[in-house]
Image (cartoon, rainbow, N blue to C red):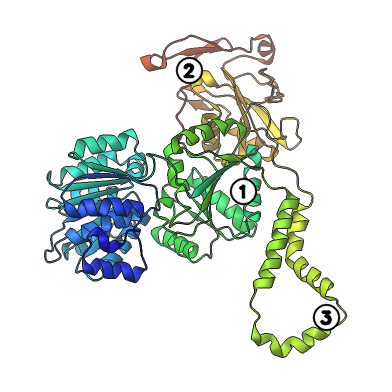
């Protein structure tokens, strides 16, 4: 087994490594460190999150830095504030016996103060691309003499849209510098950076390229969209010792899910871009100290999470990009420990599971959401073990005689039964009569039993469909954002060729119909009307809600009954730039251009 002493590291670094309790290098450290120490070279290193990449470039960088010079010699770019601070703190720990000054540059803090710290003599600068570009534009930092540039989590930086910032920043650096690119995956954009800014880089790969970690088990749970949150709670309750990150696609959903969990008695918190830096720091501190058991986060905000003992990653919603799943699952199964990555999906999302399997080269196991009785059993035995393993407090000795008197007519069996029931009753009362969530069926987005015939739900017709560039996900996102609703407030989305259907609860009906009165997008009326369609057929099924008033285009109720319900569309290629027109109610309108989904 390789030791750090065998990698060629100097004595001061070995002392720091010993203080931190590291004994043997990880695979990426064992492969990268000797090469980076031995020669001046560019490098592309592919390794999963949590495999020790920071030390893999951090140790060689510190050893190569000239501590006697106050010139900035090393630049490290990272995608988020959290990761920037994490790298900075780790480098400070590594260099505790070396006179190396490391400064973090990131948004959300005083740019003037950061510039002052750099001018005092920062040999290594760790920065987010946006703030670094801002400081370069203001001439607050000089990176024209750096010798080493590290692109950490390169795939994530490019996925976040930092390509132009990165290329601009690199244009201000010497051409003869060494560039070290570390990434979990190797999408096309990362390859372009490597080709454009690196010369004959050495490439090392830990595991298979773009594959998932062997220490993570991948599971998926198929439920109806309306049961997604209930499924999340059951997964948490079925794993009493869970210490997890729950991933949502948007900041709004992240905040909403976290608030619901807190209201329902779970120790949860939200981490997303709308929080101030101070709020984010407080949330992360609570998570690291386990005051928060379930951290609900967006993909961007979670990039700075560096906690080795996360037991589960729960994909409350799958990401838009398959590569992002690799980063998510890499939050667990770190530092040699095993982890579980759970995915909550609807039936129509099953195709994404297959895509992820091909990308990470791992198979998912389909599991059933635990029933209420199964959760009660798990919680009962968990509670019994907790009581059994609790260390008795000697401070209660003086009260024992009085306590014994209270229980003198209670048998041992009855006492145990009552003790366990104190905590167990709340689970039993909640779950004893709950329904099975494993019942997805049908072909539309949401396959719950809550259709238009349900007295609590309203079904609507909308005059856009697949011809307008929509699938159910794009239409759901459009409705959610247009109506300012939560993602789970819109369900049973069923997209046809030239029209679609969707559902909301009845309490949203007035808001939906009012919002789409005389509503236009790109000059075209988008009509939403209450429907009698059950969601299982392609029929129109609209019914009037206007009490006999004329349609916006000048038609009337009698005309409407006589009109054909099918939209006739003049065909033209989307890529040609020509507009299509659809015929509806006798008037020609500009075809509504489908909006791309927001990430």
The residue shown at (61%, 19%) is 551
Q: Which residue carries the number 1 mark? A: 232
* The C terminus - image quarter: top left
> Dot 3: few (<14), some (14–19), or many (≥20) neighbours within 10 Å?
few
Q: Where is residue 259 in the image (x, y as percent from the top left)?
A: 58, 54
Indicate the position of residue 291 as horizontal and vertical percent values: 53, 65
The Cα–Cα distance between marks 2 and 1, rounded to whole angstroms, is: 40 Å
Depth order, front residue of 39/272 = 39
Mark 2 and mark 1 in contact? Answer it, CB < 8 Å: no
Q: Mark 2 points at which residue?
A: 591
Q: Compared to 118, does 78 lie above or below? A: above
| Residue 542, numbered label | none
Q: In this view, does 110 lie above or below 544?
A: below
| Mark 2 or mark 1, whichever is nearer to me | 1
Q: Residues within 10 Å of mark 2 (few under 14, many from 20)?
A: many
Q: Residue furthest front?
A: 1
**Residue found at x 25% / y 66%:** 13
Closest to the observer, 91 or 470: 91
* Mark 2 element type: loop
Assign the N terminus to one quadrant of the image. Answer: bottom left
Circle nearer the N terminus (2, 1): 1
Classify residue 577 by image quadrant.
top left
> Which residue is the site of mark 3?
407
Q: What element carries label 1?
A: helix
Which sits earlier in the primary sequence, circle 3 or circle 1?
1
Locate residue 74: give its quadrant: bottom left
Comparing labels 2 and 3, the label whose residue is closer to the camera: 3
């Amino acid at each position: 087994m390789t030791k750090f002493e065998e990698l060629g590291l100097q004595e001061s670094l070995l002392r720091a490594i010993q203080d931190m309790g590291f004994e043997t290098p990880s695979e990426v450290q064992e492969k990268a460190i000797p090469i980076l120490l031995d020669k001046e070279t560019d490098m592309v290193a592919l390794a999963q999150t949590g495999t020790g990449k920071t030390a893999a470039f951090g140790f060689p960088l510190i050893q190569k830095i000239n501590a006697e010079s106050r010139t900035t010699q090393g630049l490290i770019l990272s995608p988020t504030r959290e990761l920037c601070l994490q790298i900075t703190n780790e480098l400070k720990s590594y260099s505790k016996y070396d006179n190396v000054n490391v400064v973090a540059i990131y948004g959300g803090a005083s740019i003037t103060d950061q510039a002052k710290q750099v001018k005092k003599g920062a040999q290594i600068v760790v920065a987010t691309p946006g703030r670094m570009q801002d400081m370069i534009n203001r001439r607050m930092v000089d990176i024209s003499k750096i010798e080493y540039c590290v692109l950490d989590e390169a795939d994530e930086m490019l996925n976040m849209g930092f390509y132009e910032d990165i290329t601009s920043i690199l244009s201000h650096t010497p051409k003869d510098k060494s560039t070290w690119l570390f990434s979990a995956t190797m999408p096309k954009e990362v390859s372009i950076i490597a080709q454009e800014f690196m010369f004959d880089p050495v490439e090392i790969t830990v595991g298979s390229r773009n594959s998932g970690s062997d220490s993570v088990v991948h599971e998926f749970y198929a439920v109806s969209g309306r049961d997604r949150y209930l499924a999340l709670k059951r997964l948490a309750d079925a794993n009493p010792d869970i210490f997890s990150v729950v991933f949502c696609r948007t900041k709004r959903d992240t905040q909403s899910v976290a608030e619901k969990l807190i209201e329902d008695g779970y120790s949860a918190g939200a981490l997303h871009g709308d929080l101030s830096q101070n709020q984010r720091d407080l949330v992360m501190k609570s998570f690291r100290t386990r005051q928060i058991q379930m951290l609900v986060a967006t993909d961007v905000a979670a990039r700075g999470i560096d906690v080795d003992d996360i037991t589960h990653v729960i994909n409350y919603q799958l990401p838009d990009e398959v590569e992002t799943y690799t980063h998510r699952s890499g939050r667990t199964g770190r530092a040699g420990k095993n982890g579980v990555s759970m995915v909550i999906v609807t039936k129509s999302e099953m195709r994404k599971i297959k895509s992820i399997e091909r990308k990470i080269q791992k198979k998912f196991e389909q599991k059933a959401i635990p029933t209420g009785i199964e959760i009660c059993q798990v919680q009962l035995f968990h509670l019994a073990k907790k009581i059994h393993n609790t260390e008795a407090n000697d401070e209660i000795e003086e009260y024992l005689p009085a306590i014994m008197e209270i229980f003198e007519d209670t048998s041992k069996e009855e006492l145990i039964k009552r003790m366990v029931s104190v905590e167990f009753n709340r689970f039993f009362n909640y779950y004893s009569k709950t329904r099975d969530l494993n019942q997805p069926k049908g072909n539309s987005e949401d396959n719950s039993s809550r259709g238009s015939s349900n007295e609590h739900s309203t079904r609507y017709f909308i005059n856009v469909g697949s011809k307008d560039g929509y699938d159910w996900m794009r239409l759901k996102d459009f409705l959610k954002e247009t109506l300012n609703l939560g993602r789970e407030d819109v369900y049973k989305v069923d997209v046809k060729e030239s029209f679609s259907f969707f559902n909301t609860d009845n309490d949203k009906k007035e808001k939906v119909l009012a919002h789409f009165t005389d509503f236009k997008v790109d000059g075209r009326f988008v009509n939403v009307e209450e429907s009698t369609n059950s969601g299982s057929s392609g029929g129109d099924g609209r019914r009037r809600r206007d009490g006999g008033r004329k349609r916006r285009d000048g038609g009337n109720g009698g005309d409407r009954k006589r009109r054909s319900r099918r939209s006739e569309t003049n065909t033209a290629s989307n890529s040609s730039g020509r507009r299509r027109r659809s015929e509806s109610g006798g008037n020609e309108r500009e075809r509504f251009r489908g909006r791309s989904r927001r990430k």
